[in-house]
Amino acid sequence: MQQAAQGFKTDIVHFTAEDGYSLSGTLYRPENPKASIIMSSATGVPQGFYRRFAEYAAVRGFQVLTFDYRGISASAPKKLKGFRMSYLDWGHYDLSAAIDYLTGFTLPIYMTGHSYGGQTLGLTRNHHAVRMMYCFGTGAGWHGYMPFKEKIKVQVIWNIVFPPMAAVSGYLPWSKLNMGADLPVDVYRQWRRWCKNPAYFFADPEQQHLIELYAQVKTPIHAVAALDDDWALPRSRQAFMQHYTHAPMQFIDLKPRDLGLKAIGHMGYFRKGAEQIWHQMLQSFEQDLAA
């Protein structure tokens, strides 16, 4: 445990998913929290990337839980080679376990999702416990929604660069390209397959039950897309978010210059300089608390 000068504490915490897998997280705890926020990460992005946002929210009275999905960073086994899992486990089991963990504090629970993190709410068994979700850069992943240059780049990576790397290593050594944490091979294979279709995993014959799962979510959602986020532009966002058919939905488009930023892209939502984005989100949570 560490005492921060800003008036909150950070604790390394561990909690167990329904299938018995142990997960590692960090809890940012102000003295008298008004509510809890779960930070649901992007694919292959370690929880430490969200530290600035978590500290910002904690200073403003929100308890924040960041965590690593199974197979990622602090929640990874000693060796990724031979580690088997489904990409969907991160929502089915891991986020569900994070929600269970925060439920024990008897505080209102909100959720912030980044990219894949915004997809995970529909995979959980306890989404009803989340009062509101803000998600950033959440889209369907198909290259056809991307600008031409990014489309070509992504196809080269998926079809030429990644396959031999994964074949040799037995996992995707993403860290060697400075793109994030290494990925379990099953995550890589499913992600690659689903990103080939405009409808993402909703088009997979083996995943048709997901359509009904997502339709059960009634949590209000604010889906944010930066207009320079080539991986999740508004068309891509709409292609995925439309499956939250019964969730009250608000789409928010961000122009970097309107926030005094040169760029946001796919990762800038949580980098230094994005405080105005966080402020607007926390305001929405506070307004919900006051309602």
Image: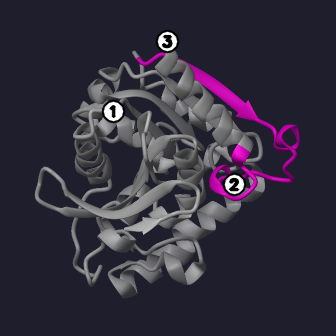
Residue at label 1? 107
Q: Count the marks: how many?
A: 3
What element does badge 3 sit on? loop
Give percent across and percent down for residue 66.
Answer: 42, 55
Question: At 54% across and 58% down in the image, what residue appears?
Answer: 50
Amino acid beneath label 3: Ala
**For residue 251: magenta?**
yes
Residue at label 3? 291
What element does badge 2 sit on? helix
Q: Report the quarter where the N terminus lies.
A: bottom left
- Between the C-alphas of marks 2 and 1, the distance is 29 Å
User: Which of marks 1 and 2 precedes in the sequence?
Assistant: 1
- Between the C-alphas of marks 2 and 3, the distance is 31 Å
**For residue 103: magenta?**
no
Comparing 146 with 174, the one in front is: 174
Comparing 80 with 163, the one in front is: 80
Mark 2 and mark 3 residues within 8 Å of each other at the beta carbon: no
Give percent across and percent down for residue 222.
Answer: 56, 27
Give percent across and percent down for residue 130.
Answer: 36, 30
Residue 28 at least partly seen: yes
Quadrant of residue 253 in the image? top right
Question: At 53% across and 66% down in the image, what residue appears?
Answer: 158
Above or below, 148 relative to 225: below
Horizontal side, residue 14 vs residue 1: left or right: left
Question: At 87% across and 45% down in the image, what residue appears?
Answer: 260
Amino acid beneath label 1: Leu
Residue at label 2? 268
Above or below, 225 relative to 175: above
Q: Which residues are magenta?
A: 247-275
Give percent across and percent down for residue 90.
Answer: 31, 52
Q: Nearer the viewer, mark 2 or mark 3?
A: 3
